[in-house]
Amino acid sequence: MPKAQRIPMARQPSAVATAKGQVQPGPKWAGRAVATAARNLARSGWLLRGATGAAALVPVVALAGILAVLAERAWPAIVYNGLGFFTHVAWDPGSSYGNPVRTGGALHQAGATFGALPLILGTLGSSAIAIVVAVPVSVGAALVVVEKLPPRMANVLGLFLEVLAGIPSVVFGLWGALSFGPLIARDLAPLVARHVPDLPVLNFFRGSTGNGEGLLTAGLVLAVMVVPIVASTTRDLLRQVPALPKEGARALGLSDWEVSRLVSLPWARSGIIGASLLGLARALGETMAVAMVSGAFLGANPSNIYLPFTTIAATIVSQLDSAFTDGTGFYVRALAEAALVLAVITLVANVAARLLVRKAGGVALPVGRGI
Amino acid sequence: MSPALASTPTTPAQWPEAVDLTTRPVALRTCDLTLGFGSRTVLQGVNLGFPKGTVTALIGPTGSGKTTLLRSLNRMNDKVPKHWHQGDVLLDGQSIFAPGVQLMALRRRVGMVFQRPNPFPMSIADNVLAGVKAHRIASRQHHKAIVKARLSEVGLLDAVSDRLGSSPFTLSGGQQQLLCLARALAVGPDVLLLDEPTSSLDPISTEHIESLLRALVPALTIVIVTHNLAQARRVADQTAFFYQGRLVEAAPTARLFEEPSEPETARYVSGRMG
């Protein structure tokens, strides 16, 4: 660095001050490098400001841009389908053998009908099953890890959770389709279906149990995928609960379970709600695993919880290929409308998460910690 | 705060009247208690009786083992890794380490208040009721009365009566500590252990809590760890001096401060060692 060598000696730090305030003798080149870097940084301040400002805009532009493109693509379908998109169950891209028809300016295949009600219900239903199963399991696991297990075992279990979270969803899907689904269809579902009381309100839990591809299987596979997210977040939250109130509860003669229920869980409550909604968002948008175990049943609602169904995400991924073969391009527009609905559902879940977390900061939460 | 509680005893004449400790039955006694963590011995052969209905202060420099002793009186050390002990602690003549002893029942009888206030993340009323509910001490219709009685016992009711359902974390440190005291009293303990309960509080709250402790005896037996020698003189009937894990001397408070029999005690209470 010939330029750096011309800096007057006085400006060259030949020693590096550490955080503790001690001065350590550093090699001469290190001092020069620090000086050069500092000079360059000062000179390129505008560049840094510009770059970080642009980076800060990326999320805004990305969200607005994606929604805008989807809306633009979907607009003819939105007009054509109307509210029927949310109330009809029939899903038919129309006959590609006849001549395309023009309705209100949009060209589409004859007989095209897009009722997305089963997709929307399937998305919400499978995610609801996942959350109902995963949250209690996750919170229980986190409590055991934090309060009961010796540190070494807790670390091993934590490692498993993190590895589980990192497994690609296609692997979960294959496992669900090959092993878990058939297990449910062969063993669990018939047992449950037989013992559900014969009441009309419970009819959704009775009846034919199918081949293992269905709503229950998808919900449970999703639950397995959601558990690591909720459990590892909850575990970190529970570790942050201060020891003093827990000790106070123990000193009062409360059992371990009561200490968890009265002190640890309330302390972490808003965070656990947030983690659960994070898991919900994951379940709502999960595509591949659901597509592999859903049975891809389009055009009607399943008549019970064991039977094939589909979700918005699974339908988009499984129908996109054939949609591209629609010469009128209308099928793709219908899928774009479905994608828009999915985006709105997840946005609503996110906003609800934030509102809930804010609301949970009421009575019980520490405003100022301790004293 | 009532006017009676507002005056602090400042001269020796106002210090607690000497109680004849020898004639009182002992509520709690340590018998040759030696304990430690791992390879470290924290307490060495402690023999100390806590007479029923009196206040005993444990004093000594930092690291002398007084807090460890206090915590072993309701087995709060059990959960500390590598904890071990020899000897025994007798509560009304019964070992607290005996196999049949229910830890939760023991801690109901031997309550504890900590160095810093530690309210639970629930409403003020629920804080008072936490132990009452857990031990099923009273039925639901009595809960409200219990909350009011216990809060007024510690002199906190007037300050919080209009916000019993709100968070305790909006209270001042002193008020939070009073709430913790009310919570500990609500389960009806026989013995109350206090670990430097006023060290994080302002002088007025400190004075209030000290007066309260005097009002709680002789119904309760109180053991208080304190670094504040003046506090020990103000509240304690008996004072025990610990140094390097050993009980050096235990005596009626006035005698320990004025005529200590051990040279180490004399050095500590006169301020030459701290």
Image: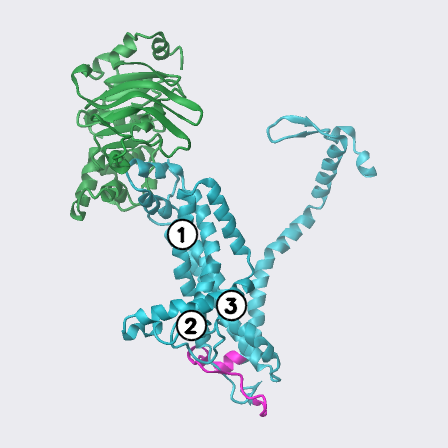
Q: Given the image, what chain letter belongs to the residue carrying mark 3? A: A
Give the letter of the green chain.
B
Q: Secondary structure at mark 3?
A: helix
Where residue A65 appears, x then y in whole percent?
59, 66
**Chain A display color:** cyan
Residue at figure coordinates x 19%, y 45% from the top left: B143
List the residue tagged with mark 1: A139
Three-letter amino acid code of the residue under disc 3 = Leu
Tell if the residue under mark 2 belongs to the same chain as the one under mark 3. Answer: yes
Answer with left or right where residue A280 lies relative to residue A365.
right
Where residue A97 appears, x then y in whole percent?
59, 91
Where residue A311 appears, x then y in whole percent?
48, 72
Q: Earlier in the sequence, mark 2 or mark 1?
A: 2
- State the separation of the CA atoms marked 2 and 3: 25 Å
Residue at figure coordinates x 34%, y 9% from the top left: B266
Farthest residue to the bottom: give it. Answer: A98
Q: Given the image, what chain letter belongs to the residue carrying mark 2? A: A
Q: Given the image, what chain letter belongs to the residue carrying mark 1? A: A
- Judge by depth and name the residue closer to the eye, A367 or A240: A240
- Answer whether residue A83 is magenta in the image: yes
Where residue A307 appears, x then y in whole percent?
42, 74
Q: Secondary structure at mark 1?
A: helix
Q: In the image, which disc is placed on residue A121?
A: 2
Assess disc 2: are there few (<14), some (14-19) or many (≥20) residues with their C-alpha within 10 Å of its C-alpha.
Answer: some
Looking at the image, can residue B113 be seen?
A: yes
List the residue tagged with mark 3: A178
Three-letter amino acid code of the residue under disc 1 = Val
Residue at figure coordinates x 29%, y 40% from the top left: A254
Residue at figure coordinates x 55%, y 68% from the top left: A67
Q: Quadrant of the C terminus of chain B?
A: top left
